[in-house]
């Protein structure tokens, strides 16, 4: 009898176990399981916390980003009703599961307590039992932070943000993965410069307490200046990879006014690099709605202190065209010049593009560089890329291009040297200490004689010039100004006769126009 009872109990237990296994693998079982959990939680009081995607200033909420990353790491995320499949950022063959931002429920377990998450439009909702919030809330949030930091350390992906039109849903910044392969070491810059920049960046990363002790905002600004094609943009990419910072590329043409620029800056995050390329173009052409005052405030005004651990990078083609107030220390901390390629930069490019550290044609290339020929790193790099299958052919094409460049420089210099100066030789009397012809004393300056045609010292006679073998060349006029001056002479009919008479006098003075 006892054995029969034991057998029946065993059969019942096995049946319930099988039923649980079967139902857990079917839609009906999944439905009943969820309903049971809901009924169970219905009899408990809960505390609800809402985590919005943006704050009141439309800045990205870092807590939302961390919680969303954490939810994607939960096992329950794989069982979600709606899951997006994305290819990996660094490995195209890798497939990532990302939960959809529709209204879904997720469960998590922490220290024996069940915690519920719900995805809503542009927000997350955290729900836990009210009697347990004091015991687990703070440690649970710290747990999320630690897990996310570990995930980001393994899968950190640099992002490139660009400012677009105002979008209440997504804010002003649109991001894409930044997979630029450039590094600081691959740039065609002097090794000493690269070493100093890396040392400066490393020092900046460790200087939070030092900046705070000085009462300064923890940020650093760089100016990269040089001709186009010298590698400024690639160097910025290398700096971002070295720092592991996201890049915010500011396009002033899409900024409405100074206030709009401030809002853009407010929506950037810490540990980021803010980049403004071709700053001189915006300042010289004044092609945007942002004025100089707005740009200066953007660089080091009060608004720039809203966020720390930032690196600002500006690029210009010619910093001599930039207002000096932009260049002062405090707004620009480090100046980095990018020159046209020299032989050292050429060897760096040959090593990175062609895998060459030495070649029999290198001495010929060095000789051409020493003769004054120059090309931009972009031009030399493109030649090497196009001929990467044959390093020798690539070097020969570089040599030919350098020779063409050098020949053009020689031709231009020769034309400039052989150009004969136009000479105006009149026998005129000199009036006044300025050496201005007496017949033109009433026409000097803007209304008469062009200022560059006026002497800045006493006149010298032809005999004195012959003896010393030189002419006074202060304020040398151009041919265009000489033509303008000659036109003025033709319009002065009353003065023409006076000059004809003066040609017969003994005192002669020559004005050389180059």
Image (cartoon, rainbow, N blue to C red):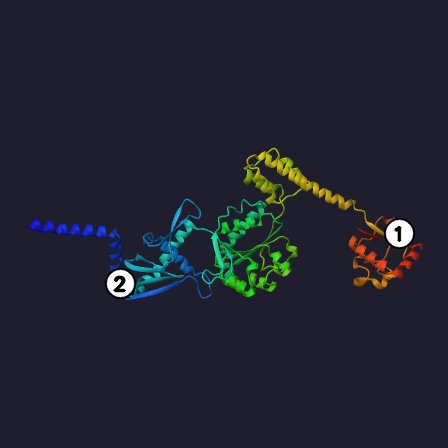
Would you say 498 lies left or right of 362 here?
right
The vertical placement of 186 against 130, above or below, is above
Residue 384 percent location from the top left of the image: 58, 39
Q: Which mark is residue 1?
A: none
Local SS, label 1? helix
Query: In this view of the protein, which residue sits in the foreground, 457 or 450?
Result: 450
At label 2, counting other C-alpha atoms closer than 10 Å, the crowd grade (few under 14, some 14-19, many 20 or more) is some
Residue 386 spot, x, y in % from top left: 57, 39
Q: CA distance from mark 1 to mark 2?
A: 110 Å
| Horizontal and vertical percent position of residue 136 | 32, 61
Task: Identify which residue is drawn at 60% across, 47% down.
Answer: 230
Residue that badge 2 annotates: 41
Above or below, 130 relative to 10: below
Q: Quadrant of residue 397?
A: top right
Question: What secondary structure is marked by label 2?
Answer: helix
Residue behind mark 1: 462
Q: Residue at x 14, y 52 (%)?
A: 12
Hey, which quadrant is residue 401 in on the image? top right
Total residue callouts: 2
């Amino acid at each position: 009898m006892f054995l029969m009872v034991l057998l029946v109990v065993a059969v019942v237990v096995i049946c319930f176990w099988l039923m649980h296994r079967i139902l857990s693998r079917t839609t009906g079982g999944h439905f009943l399981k969820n309903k049971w959990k809901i009924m169970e939680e219905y009899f408990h009081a809960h505390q609800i916390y809402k985590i919005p995607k943006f704050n009141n200033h439309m800045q990205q909420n870092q807590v939302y980003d961390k919680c969303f990353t954490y939810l994607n790491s939960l096992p329950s995320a794989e069982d979600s009703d709606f899951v997006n499949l994305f290819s990996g950022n660094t490995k195209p063959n890798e497939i990532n599961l990302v939960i959809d931002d529709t209204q879904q429920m997720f469960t998590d377990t922490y220290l024996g307590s069940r915690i519920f998450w719900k995805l809503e439009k542009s927000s997350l909702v955290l729900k836990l039992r009210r009697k347990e919030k004091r015991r687990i809330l703070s440690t649970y949030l710290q747990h999320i932070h630690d897990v996310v930091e570990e995930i980001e350390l393994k899968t950190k992906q640099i992002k490139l943000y660009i400012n677009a039109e105002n979008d209440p849903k997504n804010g002003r910044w649109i991001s894409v993965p930044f997979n630029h392969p450039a590094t600081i070491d691959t740039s065609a810059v002097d090794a000493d410069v690269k070493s100093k920049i890396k040392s400066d960046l490393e020092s900046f990363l460790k200087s939070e307490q030092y900046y705070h002790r000085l009462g300064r905002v923890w940020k650093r600004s760089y100016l990269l200046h040089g001709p186009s094609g010298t590698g400024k943009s690639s160097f910025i990419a290398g700096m971002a990879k070295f720092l592991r910072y996201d890049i915010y590329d500011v396009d002033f043409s899409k900024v409405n006014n100074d206030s709009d620029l401030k809002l853009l800056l407010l929506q950037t995050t810490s540990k980021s690099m803010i980049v403004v390329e071709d700053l001189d173009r915006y300042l010289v052409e004044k092609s945007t709605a942002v004025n100089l005052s707005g740009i200066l405030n953007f660089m080091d005004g009060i608004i720039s202190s809203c966020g720390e651990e930032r690196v600002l990078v500006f690029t210009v083609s010619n910093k001599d065209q930039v207002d000096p107030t932009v260049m002062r220390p405090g707004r620009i901390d480090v100046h980095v010049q990018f020159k046209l390629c020299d032989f050292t930069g050429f060897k760096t490019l040959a090593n990175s593009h062609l895998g060459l550290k030495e070649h029999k044609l290198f001495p010929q290339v060095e000789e051409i560089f020493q003769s004054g020929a120059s090309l931009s790193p972009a031009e030399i790099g493109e030649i090497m890329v196009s001929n990467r299958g044959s390093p020798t052919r690539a070097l020969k094409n570089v040599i030919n291009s350098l020779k063409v460049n050098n020949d053009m420089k020689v031709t231009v210099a020769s034309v400039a040297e052989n150009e004969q100066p136009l000479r105006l030789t009149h026998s005129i009397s000199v009036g006044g200490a300025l050496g201005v012809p007496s017949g033109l004393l009433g026409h000097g300056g803007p209304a008469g004689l062009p200022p560059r045609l006026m002497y800045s010292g006493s006149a010298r006679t032809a005999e004195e010039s012959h003896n010393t073998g030189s002419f006074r060349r202060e304020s040398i006029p151009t041919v265009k100004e000489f033509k303008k001056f000659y036109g003025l002479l033709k319009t002065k009919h009353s003065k023409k006769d006076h000059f004809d008479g003066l040609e017969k006098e003994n005192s002669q003075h020559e004005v050389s126009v180059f």
